[in-house]
Image: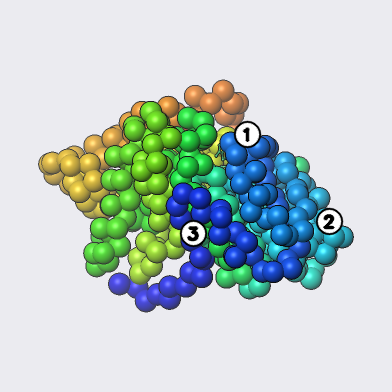
Amino acid sequence: MINFNLYNPVNLCFGKDAHEQLPTLIPQGAKILMTYGGGSIKQNGVYDNVRGALQEFEVVEFGGIEANPEYDTLLKALDIIKSQNITFLLAVGGGSVIDGTKFLASAALYEGNEPWDILAKGIRTEVGMPFGTVLTLPATGSEMNSGAVISRRSIGQKRGMGGPGLFPQFSISDPTVVASIPHRQLANGLVDAFTHVMEQYMTYPTSATLQDRISEGILSTLMEIAEPLLKDPSDYDTAANFMWSCNMALNGLIQKGVPTDWSIHAVGHELTAAYNIDHARTLAIVLPSMYRYKFEQKQAKLAQYGRRVLGLDGSDFDVAHEAIDRTEAFFNSLGINTKLSQYGVDTTGIEKRAAKQLDNYGWVSLGEHKDITPADVEKILAMAI
Ligand code: NZQ
Ligand code: ZN
C-alpha cells in the first residue's frame, strides 16, 4: 500500500432537515454571500428553507451560476464579495455552484492581478475565504472534497483547481432534495459517481484490499439503486443511499494508498469545453473507449470488477471484455449515450483539437502508468465517436 495522509475537515451534516443546523454552523456576525444556480432552489423549497434558517444573518444573494460554472459570471460575484465586504460564502446547489463558490473562496483572498492564473497556472489554494454548502444534487462529491472545475467559454477551456483551503467548513446533505431532480441529472449523478470510483479503482491489482472492497461496494450500490432511483427519487432511503454513495465516491477516502487514473476526466473535460456536453455524459463517452484502448494493462482489474461487482464467470480475458460491455450497457440503460456522434455535435477534428489542448496544458502523460500521450488521446477519441 502506498503511504498516505488522510485529511478531511468537512463537517458533513447528513439527513432530513439538516439545514436547521445552519445558524450554529456559520460564524456569528458573518456577512454571507449566498450563491446559487438557475433557480431550481426557488421551486423545490430549498431556497425558503435556507433563507428561513439564516434570518439572524446579513445575507447578499448571487444567483445565475451556470452548469459548468463560467469564469466571467464568477468575476461578477467576486466584485460583490470585495465591494460589500463579504466574510462567508454559502453555496446552495450542485457541483457547479459549489465549484464556482470554491473559486470565489480562493479568488477572494488571491493577491495576484489575474484570478484566471489560479486555474491556468495551477496555483494551489492554501487558505480561502471560509464557506459552507447546501448540496442539492448528489454527483460530484464536491461537497466533501477540495477540488473545483471552472469553465471559461471565451477561450474554450475547462480547468481544475484545488488545495486544502478549499474544503467546505460544512456541507448540508439532505436526501429529500433528490425528489425534485430531473431524470437527466439523476442519470448524470449516477454515472459521474460511478466513474469517480472507476478512476481510483480500475488500474492494476494492488495490495489495498480494503480500498478495493469499499470501491466495489460503492459501484454495487450505485448499480443496485439506479433503477429504483430513476423510478422514484422521492423514496427517502434510495435517495439517501444515492447521496452517500456519490459523496463516498469522491471525498478522498478510496484514493488513499492506491494508484489512480483520472484520464477519463481529463479527456472528458475537453468534450465539455468543445461542446458544453454535461460532465457525466462526457465520461460515459470516454470510459468504454479508454478501457478498450488500455485493455491489456487494465485486464486483471477489469476481471476482478467483472467477477466481484458484475458476478461474471470465465477467463480473465473474457470477463474483462464482458465487464466493459456491461458497464457501457449500464450507462445506456440510464438513457446516457456512449458515442459522441449521438450528441448531435459536429465531431470533425475533435480528436486533434482535444489532444492539442491537453498538450498545451502539459498533460502529456495521463493514466496510472503515465503513458497516455496526446497521440493516444487522439486514437481513444476516434474510437469514441
Ligand atoms: O442551476 P439550477 O437551477 O440549480 O439547476 C441545476 C442544473 O441545471 C439542476 N439541479 C441541481 N439540483 C437540483 C436541480 N434541479 C432540480 N432539483 C434539484 N434538487 O441540475 C443542473 C446541473 O447542476 P450541476 O451543479 O451543473 O451538476 P453537477 O452536480 O453534476 O456538477 C457538474 C459540475 O461539477 C464538476 C463538473 O465538471 C461540472 O462542471 N465536477 C466537480 C468535481 C469536484 N469538485 O470534485 C468533480 C467532478 O468530476 C466534476 O468535474
Ligand atoms: Zn466527475
Separation (CA) of disc 3 from disc 1 = 23 Å
**CA neighbours of label 3 inside 10 A, class few (<14), some (14 to 19), many (20+):** some
Q: Position of residue 284 (x, y in %)?
A: 44, 37
Local secondary structure at mark 3: strand
Local secondary structure at mark 2: helix
Horizontal side, residue 94 vs residue 73: left or right: left
Up-down relation of residue 208 to residue 243 (above or below): below
Q: Which mark, by number, is residue 43? A: 1
Inspect the image, locate mark 3, and give the three-letter code of the amino acid beneath it.
Cys
Q: Which mark, by number, is residue 13? A: 3
- The residue labelled by disc 2 is 79
Inspect the image, locate mark 1, and give the three-letter code of the amino acid beneath it.
Gln
Up-down relation of residue 385 to residue 196 (above or below): above
Give whichever of 237, 385 is nearer the camera. Answer: 237
Q: Is residue 175 visible?
A: yes
Q: Position of residue 23 (x, y in %)?
A: 62, 61
Residue shown at 26% from the left, 64% from the top: 210
Q: Position of residue 66 (x, y in %)?
A: 67, 41
Looking at the image, is mark 1 or mark 2 nearer the viewer?
A: 1
Res 350 → quadrant: top right
